[in-house]
Amino acid sequence: MPLDPEIKKEIIENFRRHPNDTGSPEVQIALLSARVKQLEIHLKIHRKDFHSRRGLMKLIGQRRSLLNYLRRTDFKRYQELINKLGLKK
């Protein structure tokens, strides 16, 4: 289930660091968070969809590793992103 291109473009505009930025950790984490939310909604409806549940766990792992990288390299950016996305930590 890919994200809608309009939603993806909006997320990139909100989290980019410079005008041509599409791959910074902030953008990648924000996109993964949107996909996680989308899958959580899907799994509330389809409780026995274990293949999608595995995909959700993989996305959460990717997001976690990107968050750990950002935390190691620039803690201030990490904190701002956590607050902006409303993630627990």
Image (cartoon, rainbow, N blue to C red):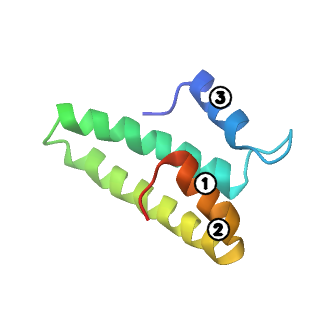
Question: For mark 1, what is the residue?
Answer: 81
Answer with mark 2 or mark 1, whichever residue precedes in sequence. Answer: 2
Marks 3 and 2 in Cβ contact (< 8 Å): no
Numbered disc 1: secondary structure: helix
The residue indicated by pointer 3 is 10
Position of the N terminus by quadrant: top left
**Residue at the image position 35 percent from the left and 51 percent from the top:** 56
Q: Is residue 48 above or below residue 74?
A: above
Q: Is residue 52 left or right of residue 21?
A: left
Q: Disc 2 designates what residue?
A: 70
How far from the left and from the top, in percent, is residue 80? 63, 56
- Whole-angstrom CA distance, mark 2 to mark 1, is 10 Å
Q: Is residue 48 above or below residue 58?
A: above
Labelled pair 1, 3 in contact (Cβ < 8 Å): no
Q: Amino acid at mark 1?
A: Leu
SS at circle 3: helix
For the residues labelled 1 and 3, the Cα–Cα distance comes to 16 Å
Question: Is mark 2 in CB contact (under 8 Å) with mark 1?
Answer: yes
Q: Image height check: is 72 above or below 60? A: below
Between the C-alphas of marks 3 and 2, the distance is 22 Å
